Image (cartoon, helix red, strand yellow):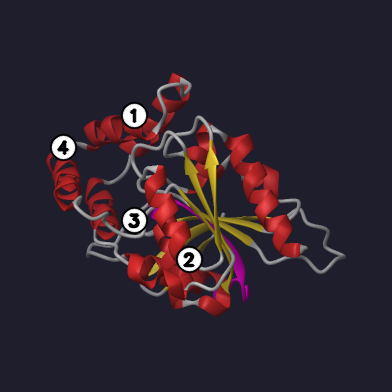
């Protein structure tokens, strides 16, 4: 699968399109993974959506098969990578689905490139450090700095799933995240922990679905409610029994809610 040069990095992406080629198709659907993830975390979504939308998955900079920069970067850099990829593919507008870190990138994208934004799905994410949680965020980043990727993955992914998750699935995800390059992971985490655009969410004009697992301990439902309240055209949906990685833990419900949202836009 291809890499595309976007600015100073090579961005890895996959495009799967089983829409009817003799019909004018909808805008593509682009999925953006969370911290330490990659394009493979959408394995339950690509088959469910690729017959209705050209479906794109990517590896954010510092992740997967994309370039690992040797300098710090921010969420705005990641959003710029995404719009450059879309331009390289000849895509004018896209529906964007982002989970956790990916949700931050999607919010930034909507603010920076509104004409390229068809709609947003913000899953299990936040718009900035919640009031009173600065010390918690500092401690979380210090934990990442002071421990190996294996230890970081074990702690963070265990916390990201609900208590009822299939332990085999959980262990698989722990192993995937543990394979991350430590320096690149830290840079991405620093970008996420420094993200703060809550006071700008009222500027987002694109239709928005805010999704959250009702057992999400990383970005709890209260944070999703706050995002939905700040965006003028947003609605909120909870996924029962899901933790922070709701698209993997409860894929059928995740897919159903997202598809209903996108189908409603077409209507």
Which tag, 2 or 3, sits closer to the chain's start?
A: 3
Nearest to N terminus: mark 2 or mark 1:
1
Q: Is residue 73 left or right of residue 66?
A: left
Q: Are marks 2 and 1 in contact (CB under 8 Å)?
A: no
Q: Earlier along the polypeptide chain: callout 1 or callout 4?
A: 4
Inter-mark Cα distance, 4 to 2: 37 Å
| Residue that appears at 75% across and 51% down | 51
Which residue position is annotated with label 1?
158
- Where's residue 27, x and y in %? 68, 67
Q: Point out the frontmost of discs 1 and 4.
A: 1
What residue lies at 37% left-to-right and 50% top-to-bottom?
A: 223
Q: Earlier in the sequence, mark 1 or mark 3?
A: 3
Q: Quadrant of residue 253?
A: top right
x and y, in percent, of residue 42 in the image: 55, 44
Residue labelled with disc 2 = 231
Q: Earlier in the sequence, mark 4 or mark 2?
A: 4
For the residues bearing labels 4 and 3, Cβ distance under 8 angstroms: no
Q: CA distance from mark 2 to mark 3?
A: 29 Å
Q: Mark 2 and mark 1: span between their CA atoms?
A: 31 Å
Depth check, front residue: 113 or 262: 262
The mark that comes first in sequence, 4 or 3, is 3
């Amino acid at each position: 699968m291809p890499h595309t040069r976007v600015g100073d990095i090579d961005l890895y992406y996959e495009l799967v399109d089983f829409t009817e080629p003799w019909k004018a198709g909808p805008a593509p659907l682009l999925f953006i993974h969370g911290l330490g993830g990659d394009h493979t975390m959408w394995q339950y979504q690509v088959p469910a959506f690729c017959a209705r939308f050209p479906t794109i998955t990517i590896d954010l900079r510092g992740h997967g098969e994309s370039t690992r920069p040797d300098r710090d970067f921010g969420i705005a850099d990641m959003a710029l990578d995404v719009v450059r990829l879309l331009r390289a593919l000849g895509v004018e507008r896209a529906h964007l689905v982002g989970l956790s870190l990916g949700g931050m990138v999607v919010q930034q994208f909507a603010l920076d490139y509104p004409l390229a934004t068809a709609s947003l799905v913000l899953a299990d994410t936040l718009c900035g450090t919640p009031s009173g949680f600065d010390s918690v965020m500092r401690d979380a980043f210090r934990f990442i700095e002071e421990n190996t990727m294996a230890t970081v993955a074990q702690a963070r992914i265990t916390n990201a799933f609900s208590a009822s998750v299939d332990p085999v699935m959980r262990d698989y995800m722990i192993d995937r995240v543990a394979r991350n390059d430590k320096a690149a992971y830290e840079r991405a985490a620093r970008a996420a922990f420094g993200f703060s655009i809550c006071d700008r969410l009222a500027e987002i004009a694109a239709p928005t679905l805010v999704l959250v697992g009702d057992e999400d301990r990383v970005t709890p439902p209260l944070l999703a409610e706050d995002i939905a309240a700040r965006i003028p055209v947003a609605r909120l949906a909870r996924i029962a029994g899901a933790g922070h990685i709701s698209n993997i833990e409860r894929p059928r419900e995740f897919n159903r809610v997202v598809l209903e949202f996108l189908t409603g836009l077409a209507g």
